[in-house]
Image: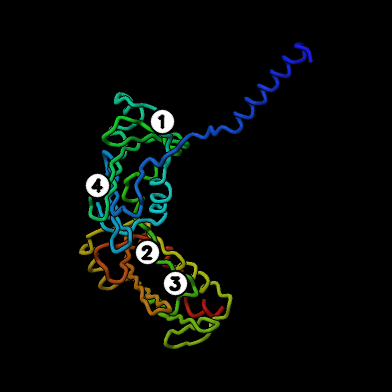
Amino acid sequence: MNKKNLIPIIVLVVLVIIYALTKTRNYTEKRIEFFGIDSVKIGAIELITVDDTLKLAKVNGEWMIDFPIQYPPVPRKMEDIFGKVLKIETSKIPVSESESSFEKYNLTDSLGTIVRLYDVSNKLLSESIVGKSDNYNFSHARKKDENKVYQLVSNISYMIKPDIKSWRNKTILELEELEISQINFASEEFNYTLTATDSLWQYNDFISNFSIKAPNASMKSIASGLKRVNVSDFIDHDYESYADKFAKPLAELTITDFTGKLTDLKFVEGEEKKLVVMKDDETEHLFIMHESWLNKFKKSKEDFEK
């Protein structure tokens, strides 16, 4: 083989070797979890902005809003915290190590959201700042006592806004039809009991008693309404303003499930076609819902006979 033919072969072999090396070398960027805290150890979470503060705490094994008010949180929000926020990843390489870049990335105390993680003894485990981001694909963060700024692999800034209204669980009751044993409804115009039997619902208004034929539009509407009862807003620590009304409510709805648990809802008139609702005679928190929801239960005997 002469030199003229050997040179291209050598070049080809070198190229093949280079190609093989590029294919086998791992160019995957090394990522780490930004917070790096075992979620099992977390007993409380505090989210702080210049305008709001929200604290979540684990109480008897269940997560609750602890500040500014004690109330159950939206389950989806807690799923986001533990499934997305606390597991958020970043490159090991910071995008900046300069304090002068904090404002650019919204990582000052006044521009970002401070995230504090505590253990079950309320000992501080971690304190970080996450910057607000308009980019769906990423946000930035830094440890509170460090200058290193990291770009997170997704935008978590909207998940940690400490707006109390978005965190309070607006669902006050969830029942599938098969879970309901009895429904009692009483108002000035209507007063009846619906009882579940093996196959059909039984209607009773203390005068008439009959089985409701399926399908029945009124029964279907009631079952649908109880599947998830959502409120639009809350009234906290102001029962005295409504005490006289609740002494003689517009309507009362009592639902019994097959475990024997009772849920009692009392309704009084609110503002602008709204109702104020008291659940199980608890006066600390009242609820607001649209009056149209109650219309599902304002049914006559004839409605159930159809």
Return the disc, 1 or 4, that comes first in the chain's sequence.
1
In this picture, residue 111 sits left or right of residue 9 = left
Mark 3 lies on residue: 297
Residue at mark 2 to residue at mark 4: CA–CA distance: 33 Å
- Contact, mark 4 vs mark 3 (Cβ under 8 Å): no
Q: Residue at x 48, y 87 (%)?
A: 209
Q: Secondary structure at mark 3?
A: helix
Residue 229 spot, x, y in % from top left: 42, 64
Mark 4 lies on residue: 124
Quarter of the image that includes the C terminus: bottom right
Residue 188 spot, x, y in % from top left: 36, 76
The answer to which quarter of the image holds residue 105 is top left
Return the disc, 2 or 4, that comes first in the chain's sequence.
4
Residue at mark 1 to residue at mark 3: CA–CA distance: 61 Å
- Label 2 neighbour load within 10 Å: few <14, some 14-19, many 20+: few
- Label 1 neighbour load within 10 Å: few <14, some 14-19, many 20+: some
In this picture, residue 297 sits left or right of residue 280 = right
Rendered view: 43 above or below 245: above
Q: Residue at x 31, y 46 (%)?
A: 162
Q: Residue at x 55, y 72 (%)?
A: 217
Q: Nearer the viewer, residue 157 or 297?
A: 157
- Contact, mark 1 vs mark 2 (Cβ under 8 Å): no
- Label 4 neighbour load within 10 Å: few <14, some 14-19, many 20+: some
Q: Which mark is residue 216?
A: none
- Contact, mark 1 vs mark 4 (Cβ under 8 Å): no
Return the disc, 1 or 3, that comes first in the chain's sequence.
1
Q: Nearer the viewer, residue 202 or 46?
A: 46
Mark 1 lies on residue: 93
Disc 1 marks a residue whose amino acid type is Ile
Return the disc, 1 or 2, that comes first in the chain's sequence.
1
Mark 2 lies on residue: 172
Disc 2 marks a residue whose amino acid type is Ile
